[in-house]
Image (cartoon, grey):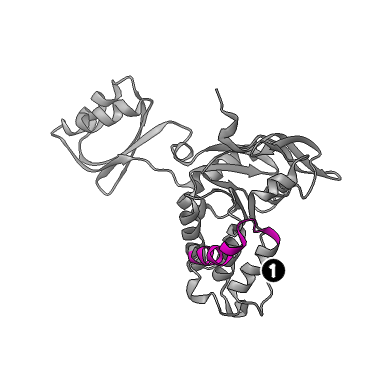
Amino acid sequence: METPNKWVINTQGLSKSYKDVEALKSLDLKVAKNSIFGFLGPNGAGKTTTIKLLLGLTRPTSGGGTVFGHDILRDNVEIRKRIGYLAQNPSYYEYMTARETLRFRARFFYTGLKDALENRIAETLEMAGLTNKADRPIKGFSGGELQRLGIAQAQVNYPDLLILDEPAANLDPGGRRDVLEVMERLRKYTTIFYSTHILDDVQQVSDTVAILNHGELVAQAPMEELLAGSDGTIYTVVMEGDPSGAQARVTRREWVSGIDTTSMNGRITWRVHVSDEQAAKAELLRLILSDEETTVIEFGRKKYELEEVFLSIVEGKENVQP
C-alpha cells in the first residue's frame, strides 16, 4: 500500500493543450522524497510545460496533482514556499557579484532568521563551488558558473524540492560536470526534479527516470530497473575453442531462454538470455568453465546504456502511432 507522504510530486491525468496542440497528455508522475529524478525527453516533449503546471504558472486543461500533498491548483502559494526553482535561461544583473545576487534573491524568498542570512549565503556559495568568486561581478562568469549560481539562488530558502529546467543545457563538458557535482552534493538535503535531454547526465546522477515523448509519459522507473533492459537479463561471454559441449549443458537449464552466437577473429561471443538472474549468477560461469574445450576470455552481465533504452522506448512508441 502506498504511503501518501512518500510522494513529493504526484500527478493524475495531468494534461495541457494550447489551442489544437496537446502539449501534455494525461501525465501520471510520482517523485519520491530525497530522490534525484531525471525528467527526460527530446526538445518540445512537454518537460517545461510540466514544470510550469507544477509551479502553478499555468493551469491544466484537465487532470491535476499534488506537491507535498498540496493541490497544484488551489495551494500553489504554499507549494512555492517549499520549492527552489531554476529556469532554463535565467537572467542576472551582471554588475552584481555572486554574493549580492544571492542577497537580492533572499529579499523575495528567504524565510529564515535575518541574522542567519549571511551564513546561509556563504553556505550556498560553498555548495555551488563559488566561494572563491563570491565577490566578483558575474559579468565575467562562465556558463557553468552562471548555472551553479542559479542553483545557489534556488537553494537560498532551504527548499524541500529543487526544480531545475535543463540545468546543463548549452554547457561545455567541464561546465556540465560541475553542475552535476553540485546536484550530487545537494542530494542529502533536498529532493531534486530536473528536466533534460542529455542522456549521459541522467545516467550519471539520477536514481529514478521518467521519459516523455510528444507530451506522453512512455516510461518511469528506477535507473537500475530501466538499464536492466526490457528483454530480461543478458550475459555476454567471449570464448576461444569449441563451445558445443558447454552450449548443450547451458541450454538444458530452464532459466536459459536462448543463446545468440557470433564469431569473429577466432573468438566466439554468446549473448545468453536468462529468466532467473540469481540462478545465472550461481551456475552460468561454472557450467561454461567445466568444459575443457573452451577458454573464457570475457564474462559479464550486459549493461545497457541509457541511450539504448531511450531510443528503444521512443522509437518503439513512434512506430505504433498511426
Verify whether residue 117 appears in magenta: yes
Q: Is residue 269 visible?
A: no
Q: Which residue sits at x=47%, y=63%?
A: 177
Range shown magenta = 108-126
Amino acid, disc 1:
Ser
Vertical comparison of 134 with 255: above or below: below
Within 10 Å of disc 1 (Cα), the crowding (few <14, some 14-19, many 20+) is few
* Front-most of residues 311 and 18: 18
Q: Position of residue 215 (x, y in %)?
A: 70, 43
State left or right for residue 17 relative to residue 252. Answer: right
How many numbered circles does the render carry?
1
**Residue 75 highlighted magenta (yes or no):** no
Q: Quadrant of the C terminus?
A: top right
Could you say which quadrant of the image residue 236 lies in?
top left
Residue corresponding to mark 1:
91
Vertical placement of 174 versus 25: above or below?
Answer: below
* In this rendering, position of residue 197 left or right of residue 20: left
Position of 293 compared to 250: left or right?
left
